[in-house]
Amino acid sequence: MATVTTAAPSAQQSTATRRIFNWRTRQMLLAFLFILPAIINFTVFRYIPIAASIRASFYEYSLLRGLGDFIGFDAYIRMASDDTFWKSLQVTSLFVLYKVPLQIVLSLALAVFLTRETFGAGIVRSAILTPMVTSVIVASIIWAMMYHSQQGLIQSILGVFGIPRQTFLSDASRALPAVTVMMIWKDLGFSFIILLAGLKAIPATYYEAALVDGANAWEAFRRVTIPLLMPVLMFVVVTQAVFSFQVFVPVYQMTRGGPLDATKVLVYYIYQQGFRFQDMGYASALSVVALIIMIVISYLLMRWLRPQT
Amino acid sequence: MAVAEQHRGAIAPSVRAENDTLELVKRVANLLLRGVLYAIISLIFLVPFIWMIFGSLRRETEIFQYLFPLNWHTFFPIEWTLQHYEDIFGISDAGKRAGLNFGRNLLNSFIVSTGVVISSLVFNTMGAYFFARLKFPKKNWLLAFVLVTLFVPFEVTMVPLYIVVRYLNIQNTYWAMIVPWFASPFVIFALIQYFRDIPYDLDEAALIDGASYLHVLRTIIVPLAVPGLVTVSLLEFQFIWNLFYWPLIVVQDADIQVLQVVISSQTTQEQTFWGRTFAGSALASVPVIVIFLALQRYYVRGVASTGIKG
């Protein structure tokens, strides 16, 4: 009797728990359906490609003949003695080192100059953002025409100052700076709006306090603006460095890596190996190395730029 | 004392007047300087577009004729013409002979961009709802799985992506240009922030009343997150519209190729047809510029928030 009374509720309880458990499982499965498409996308189109290219880098793999013999680390060994690869790394680093600091300084100066809501500031801000919303390919096409050694608009502007025609894109020492100038023009809007939003987020009371303490504009900028803007600045530097390291389109359109490999950046070299020379195995190995370099760079930049507090 | 008082009274107005004029001159000079700087900055960013748009509307020879010395007509046409547009759309005989059909490519760009925006709105909204609201064991692991892809460099993974798309045998189709982008870590991340701003009481009440997750998402979350959804759609549209490297490698068929790639292949062969190149570039950039100017507020907020929140 006693055993029956205790057993009955517990049996009831267990069916109740089971029902709750079933309900929970159902809810969980329903919830999982919401994230499933995204998981599939990231698995198939982000993770598997990286795994596939790591695998492809150990094989002979041409676009025409498909996956061939296993060659182990041959592609990586080949890379070590590939002068064009090292040259492309050098060109890419130069591009990033020219572009990022100059772009950040210019966009910070413009953001400070255009923070105040004076008449016309809105129009100037829209103008600065216009290149950002156009494609890199259109920007590259138009700038290549502006740089044209005979009929370029820049020749005409130089003419105003009495400077004769100059060559830009076909001159080995000027091609990379020319591409860099165009890309700063193109990307400046991005760093500009982020810095502008960062500046506007700094409370005015901080500046008032600095002025009360007798600081001039420059001191206020150095001691109030810069420290408070540091996280935003860091974000902009890291993202721009990572973006710029992957530059491809302007080189493809304006110079095809030339003259004399002076603009042959890493991603263009990968494209050339994979799609011009049909060597997917080597292109994969190059991609893997580029990926590792970029992960290391962004990690180092983030550590180095983190405010010491 | 009285003398001093009188003296002060006599001298003060003229000093003040002098100060006032000086102040006025300073302010006018300041305003002028600001205006000149505004004009120079705007011109630096806009001149290439001005040159492109007016260049597309004048005869080929005119583009070069007025280059030296730099003057009003370096930019502004004397004789207006739509010839270059007739050429690139394949309406004129010259355009037909060159096999140009940019109308088709413009349509392809629209198909691909809207396809991505619509599918991305559906799947990213679902994903963001999952992370912002639903209960699931080890949800943080899934979030990490999604957000790590934010740091995977884009252009570098085009060759790897091509290998997979080739394996799926969808290269050289619209699918190849749409399917890889139907979910985006950036959009999911941004939408999570927008959804978290919506009070949880609202959907909790609906769930207690027996509403399904999908019902809550459709009737409560989506209507309240419209500004956020507009922002991410705008950024996504611009991103896909401007894509170049991916369609370049994955599509060979000119009939389904997007505008950005076609204008490039027109220019790289021989830079002889400047007018057509200008017209094609204008066609590829003016739609996004117009959309951007109309919805600038959403756009700026979207980009700015990546820096502030990220």
Image (spheres, coloured by chain):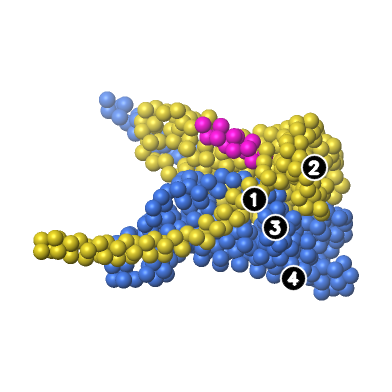
Chain colours: A yellow, B blue
Query: What type is the residue that disc 3 sits on?
Result: Tyr
Residue, disc 4:
B104
Q: Is residue A50 magenta?
A: no
Query: What type is the residue that disc 1 sits on?
Result: Pro
Measured Cα–Cα span from mark 2 to mark 3: 30 Å
Q: Where's residue A220, x and y in %? A: 45, 31
Q: Which mark is residue B167?
A: 3
Q: Secondary structure at mark 1?
A: helix
Q: Are marks 1 and 3 on the same chain?
A: no
Query: What type is the residue that disc 4 sits on?
Result: Arg
Q: Nearer the viewer, residue B204 or B304?
A: B204
Residues at marks 4 and 1 touching, judged by CB atoms closer than 8 Å: no
Measured Cα–Cα span from mark 4 to mark 3: 28 Å
Which label sits in the foreground, 2 or 3?
A: 3
Q: Which mark is residue A49?
A: 1
Residue B309 in sight here:
yes
Q: Nearer the viewer, residue A151 or B262?
A: B262
Residues shaded magenta: A290-303
Q: Chain of mark 1?
A: A
Measured Cα–Cα span from mark 4 to mark 1: 31 Å
